[in-house]
Amino acid sequence: MRQPVDSLFGRLTLLFVGVLLLSHVAWFALMRLERSQMQTRYAVEEAAFLVDAVRQHVAREPDQPLPSRVQLVEPASAAVPPDNADLPEPLRRFVDDVRERMPAGTDVRIGPPGRPPTLWVKGPQDARWIVVPVQPLRPMRPTIDRMIPWLLIIFSAAVIAALVAAWTLQKPLSLLAQAVARFGRGEPVPPVRERGPRELRLLTRGFNQMVTEVERNEHDRAVMLAGVAHDLKTPLARLRLRAEMMDEARARDGVVRDVDSMAHIVDQFLVFAHDGADRSEPVEVDEQCERIVRNYRTMSAMRAFGSTAQAAESPTIQMRLTAGSDFRLPAATLDRVVSNLLDNAHAYGAPPVVIETERSAESYTLTVRDHGKGIETQDLTRASRPFVRLDPARGGNGHSGLGLAIVERLVRRAGGELEIGNGEGGGLAVRMTFPVEVVQRTVAEAAHAW
């Protein structure tokens, strides 16, 4: 099951949203702190300005009345507030800031509570207390603030821009990842468009060049292999014809078997060299497997009947087909895969050979296993390499080391994955997994083509 956070787009989205959220919260906290400090500074400057204005007014025009909220109070008056030392912290800081703004030795006090806020100031040169109104210091409302809607709008716009940027960066990488997956399955890969940052363009360009070189080498090798195999078919046919005309039965049967083995190797070369897509019609895997097994038993019986060196015995093959009618693969691919695996099982394994199909929620599986000795664990990774024989005893006649390599190539071209391992009860188990969406896409493309 895919997890959104596991993709590059999901992680970039989380990163961008997290950074934006952190920056906006920090910015909002700083704005609140700065606004509170600005309010305090403004109140201090306003109070200092009023006190200076009153002093200048008294010095120049002592007979003129003062504004209604400004007073001059005698030091001995009972209205003078006491030097209240237990003020709240904001008022204490405000009083200290005003005292620092005034000349040295100035006494600053806050008016009595329950009345409009006033500031009482008496400097060293003042004969009376100067009482001026001050701006009330109200803390900002934490939940109801006019900046919050604008902050949300800015944050939403930033998140949208971040998502677009993440998508723009992720899209070329997604296309490149899809191309790499297709290339790994052996499917044709068209050149990937070079776009995105410079490093990504260089990576895409290198991948396109690598695909071109690999395809050229594969084509050259396939042409060479197909040419050699094709040129061998004619002399092999003549050799078989001459062998059939031999008088001695034992020598004739031995030569015919050798010619058939060489012809089988040539056919494997031709199948391995073929690099085109399978255009055959998709068929139901369960029904086709039954048909392949019947034909395989018939051909094995005919080969045994025509040879004096073999016993006429049909191969022991068991089938457990439960995938259902929706599991479909191209007919030619399925025939070659199952036939190669049956040949490999009877050449190197031991009966019975079991063919199983299953379906899960996300994929179909096709498994072919025997009950022989299997393959050593250290040799499993080399089992599907072309022209590799794991040990001399597995060589035999008519075997070129291409059986599992052909199977792996055909399975990957069909959009599946191949897993080679040893079964729990012994023997080699070849498990092929095909995602449901790949099978459905193959059937839909074939239906459109037909």
Image: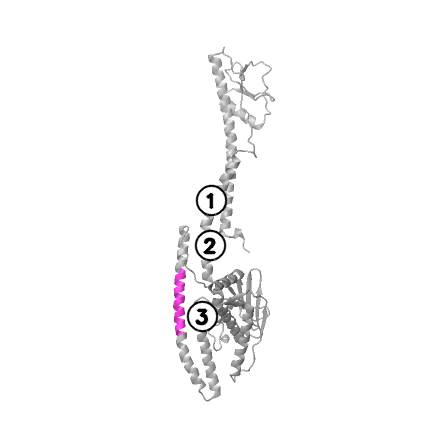
Please give the label number shown on residue 174: 2
Secondary structure state at the residue bearing disc 1? helix
Secondary structure state at the residue bearing disc 3? helix
The residue at which mark 1 appears reads as 161
Question: Which residue: 53% across, 36% down?
Answer: 148
User: How dense is the environment of label 1, judged by Cα within 10 Å: few (below 14), some, or many (20 and up)?
Assistant: few
Three-letter residue code for mark 1: Ala
Sooner in the amino-acid sequence: mark 2 or mark 3: 2
Residue 441, given in percent of the width and then of the height, sits at 50, 61
The residue at which mark 3 appears reads as 272
Three-letter residue code for mark 2: Ser
Please say whether residue 213 is one of the residues in the magenta stretch: yes
Name the colouring of the figure.
one colour
Give the quarter of the image for residue 89.
top right
Q: Are marks 3 and 1 in contact (CB under 8 Å)?
A: no
Secondary structure state at the residue bearing disc 2? helix
CA separation, marks 2 and 3? 31 Å
